[in-house]
Image (spheres, rainbow, N blue to C red):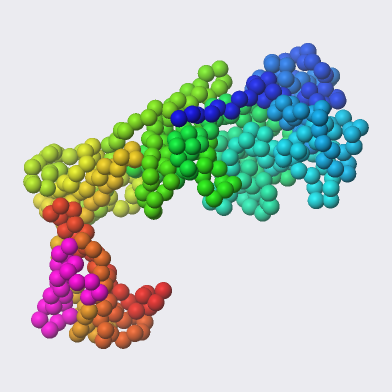
Amino acid sequence: MIFKRRKWSVFLIFVLCIGLLSPQANAESDSLKFSDVPKDKPYASAVYQLAERNIISGYKDGSFKPGASITRGQAASIISKLLKLDTRNVKDQGFKDVSPNLWSYQAISAVAEKGIFRGYGDGRFGPNDKITRAQMASIIIKAFEFNYYTHNYQATPFKDIELLKSHKDSVLTLYKLGIISGTTPSTFSPNDPITRAQAAVLITKTEIVSSGTLSVKANDYGWSEFGGYNDYHLHSTEPEKDEDEIIQVIPNNNTDKIWQMQIVPVKVGTQKLTLYSKKIDWNRYEDFKKYYVHVSKANGQFKIKFEETDDVEMTNVRLNVTKDTIKNISLAKMDGTVIDKDTKFHQCNEYPDYKVYCLPLTQAGDYIATVEYNNSAKVRYGVKSEHVPSEFYFNTNSIKDLPSVKVDLRDAKGDFSEFKETTKGIVKITREGNSDIFHIQGLKEGHMVVNFPKSERKRGVIDGLEIRVQIIGSIVNVEVIKLKYENRMH
């Protein structure tokens, strides 16, 4: 498999600051101390880092003017140098306000031909117009060839980008990569001009993130397309802690098929990642690759290392218990052989308002967990831990030992003198004499409905029962839901 790293010149990346192109700025910086950039300013590090490399410079009066804006013509010149575009052999793009005599004509023509910049609907380019924060986000995305996150399926805290006709995907992507931030916690100010200070910060952050970004293609694995991926950040099976987001995975979103993904580092650490080949059905794939992705950082640049693995890590199984205080939980095999008389357990942090306890499992199999309460009551649970080779964690499930259920309909609205089962053999239903009390015993795993054909079809009347039977080893669980007519109509 081949991982392709995008190659960028450090010098050209950092040229993105406007200082060298401003006709008012010095050609060279005589001092690394700007009168209007105190070292404690949040953007000072970025400004001085670029100044020390002689990439940006201040003005004759010793200032940097961090609040000054950048024009579209200046930005075009910056990007053309950044990408080493040919500015000698350019085609006229036909912009009304960009004549061959304009100082930025060649750069504007080059970036427009590459599709990095677009003109306005009236045929103008607006070389002297100020670049907005949203426009700069799109320029950076296109210049560094980042894939886009799709705003329709993602979210930012910025309320003022929702109505943008364009640029919102660019803002979202750079926000998720940690490259940009808002002007307030809930606003991005997309139409405000980007300042020299903001540009310096944007450049340095983008350079760091881009330095380690890798592109993986489906054909690197011999696949026709990717079926998807799992980075285990939002799907953590460890409820007591979220897994760190060390990388971002951005699929290409410009076609119906995912043929390429970008692995973008956001901080130092290790993250799990599974890549899947073409999907066969809703939860099966033709093939997969499973990795630990290690991200390191040296000399201001990220580095990604992939470690292929077949590891499966400890996974919690959840038990829904009563509100009584638990004294002990023991774990045994289905044949009764005790594995652990005093199994470690803890309340799952993802369910703080409910009594849901987590048991750690390190092996696949079916087990019986016996919960003993302080009042000496004992309740058994069937526990399943299934090994899925493509995943880092077991698939787990638990059911309470409840092989039969008593359903009392004496006080319910409806006529329950007759009933019909939609599926036979899943349960055994016994009526208690001539009463409206039913005993339902689970026989095999499945889902079915019991209908009461004589019940009136009107609001508030129960006209059926929904029954689900789950089985893990010798443990059987029967769940019954009373169906009201009006609920079945929706």
The residue positioned 50% from the left and 24% from the top of the image is: 303
Q: Which quadrant would residue 460 be assigned to in this image?
A: bottom left
Image quarter (top left, top right, bottom left or bottom right) of the C terminus? bottom left
Taking the image as drawn, is residue 280 in sight?
A: yes
Query: Is 238 placed left or right of 327 in the picture?
Result: right
The residue positioned 82% from the left and 19% from the top of the image is: 26
Q: Is residue 443 magenta?
A: yes
Name, please, the residue furthest toward the right: 101
- How many numbered marks are there? 0
Name, please, the residue furthest toward the left: 336
The answer to which of 381 and 76 lies nearer the viewer is: 76
Q: Is residue 308 magenta?
A: no
Taking the image as drawn, is residue 233 in sight?
A: no
Q: Is residue 359 above or below residue 78?
A: below
Query: Is 341 placed left or right of 29 in the picture?
Result: left
The residue positioned 59% from the left and 42% from the top of the image is: 148
Residue 259, position as x, y percentages in the image:
52, 42
**In this picture, which residue range is highlighted in magenta?**
421-444
Residue 38, position as x, y percentages in the image:
69, 22
The answer to which of 314 and 286 lies nearer the viewer is: 286
Name, please, the residue furthest toward the top: 30
Q: Which quadrant would residue 452 be assigned to in this image?
A: bottom left
Q: Which quadrant would residue 234 be assigned to in this image?
A: top left
Residue 422, position as x, y percentages in the image:
25, 74
Query: Is 393 placed left or right of 438 in the picture?
Result: right
Residue 182, position as x, y percentages in the image:
63, 40
The residue positioned 82% from the left and 41% from the top of the image is: 93
